[in-house]
């Protein structure tokens, strides 16, 4: 089945891991692709709601997958070495990460927006970003690979990404961010304008 570039990229990132938990799996497309490519041995598909999980059950019926209704990690009992939380807002991903296991697990996090909020949360809650990727699909998507560990990020790192800022393709995203800032600037109040000025400088000054 043809899937979006974002789904394919998320599935690629499961390589090297055996037991993969997909939180908020919805249709189960990421696990489906990961199995199709032969990347993983076992899947745990979980969602907060029955309806999406039913759809995942249908798409993943030929694979060794456990299906769990769960709010984030809360009802997950089986072990896993990679957890994916993708296609949600940054604040929801932060809420879910509050209950991440203490063991040495890798996380693939893909917020739909406000990646800076997620990066700040990670730094303040004992996680470190070990890689960052930019996907241009229908929109730009930033994907973070994360483990437990100490990290210190500057304010510009929160916006640009400590690793993304070194990757040449990021210029496209940073230029898009400047365009978005310019669009909303005139209708912003003075306090917001100050923030937007600071953000514009951060996106503008980065040399990639
Ligand atoms: C927009 S879909 C994203 C689907 C898929 N992960 C992707 O990247 O394409 C978000 C899914 O997360 C589920 N969800 C929302 N909050 C959740 C939570 N606290 N725990 C588990 N799943 C949640 C929703 O029910 C929905 O199926």
Image (cartoon, rainbow, N blue to C red):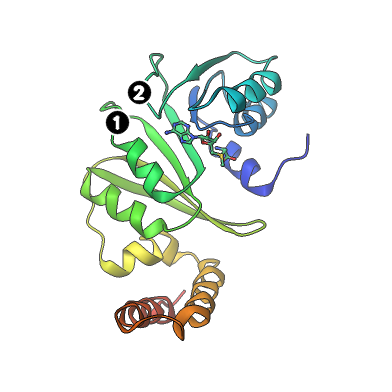
Query: Label 1, on which residue?
Result: 99
Name the spot of residue 68 as percent of width and height, x first.
49, 17
Q: Earlier in the sequence, mark 2 or mark 1?
A: 2
Q: As displayed, is residue 106 above or below residue 168?
A: above
- The structure residue drawn at horizontal position 62% and vertical position 47%, both measured from the top left corner, is 6
The answer to whether 130 appears left or right of 124 in the picture is right
Total count of labels: 2
Q: As displayed, is residue 156 above or below residue 87?
A: below
Name the spot of residue 205 as percent of width and height, x first.
39, 81
Q: Is residue 17 visible?
A: no
The answer to whether 166 appears left or right of 191 in the picture is right
**Viewer-proximal residue among 119 and 71:** 71
Name the spot of residue 197 as percent of width and height, x first.
36, 83
The answer to whether 201 appears left or right of 149 in the picture is right
- The structure residue drawn at horizontal position 38% and vertical position 78%, both measured from the top left corner, is 196
The answer to whether 38 appears left or right of 69 in the picture is right
Viewport quadrant of the N terminus: top right
- The structure residue drawn at horizontal position 64% and vertical position 18%, both measured from the top left corner, is 57
How many residues crowd around disc 2 within 10 Å: few (fewer than 14), some, or many (20 or more)? few
Q: Find out whether the residues at labels 2 and 1 contact each other: C-beta distance under 8 Å.
A: yes
**Viewer-proximal residue among 28 and 142:** 28
Query: Label 2, on which residue?
Result: 74
Q: Quadrant of residue 74?
A: top left
Q: Quadrant of residue 33?
A: top right
Name the spot of residue 180 as percent of width and height, x first.
52, 75
Q: Secondary structure beneath disc 2? A: loop
Q: Secondary structure beneath disc 1? A: loop
Q: Is residue 124 visible?
A: yes
């Amino acid at each position: 089945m043809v899937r979006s570039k974002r789904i394919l990229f998320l599935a690629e990132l499961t390589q090297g891991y055996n037991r993969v938990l997909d939180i908020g799996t919805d249709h189960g497309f990421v696990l489906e692709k990961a199995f199709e490519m032969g990347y993983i041995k076992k899947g745990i598909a979980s969602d907060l709601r029955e309806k999406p999980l039913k759809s995942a059950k249908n798409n993943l019926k030929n694979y060794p997958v456990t299906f769990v209704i769960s709010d984030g990690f809360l009802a997950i009992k089986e072990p896993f070495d990679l957890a994916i939380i993708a296609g949600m807002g940054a604040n929801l991903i932060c809420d879910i990460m509050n209950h991440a296991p203490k063991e040495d697990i890798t996380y693939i996090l893909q917020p739909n927006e406000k990646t800076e909020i997620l990066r700040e949360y990670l730094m303040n809650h004992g996680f470190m970003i070990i890689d960052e990727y930019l996907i241009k699909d229908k929109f730009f998507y930033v994907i973070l690979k994360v483990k437990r560990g100490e990290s210190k990020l500057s304010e510009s790192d929160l916006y640009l990404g400590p690793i993304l800022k070194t990757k040449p393709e990021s210029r496209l995203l940073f230029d898009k961010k400047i365009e978005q800032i310019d669009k909303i600037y005139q209708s912003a109040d003075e306090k917001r304008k100050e923030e937007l000025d600071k953000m514009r400088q951060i996106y503008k000054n980065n040399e990639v």
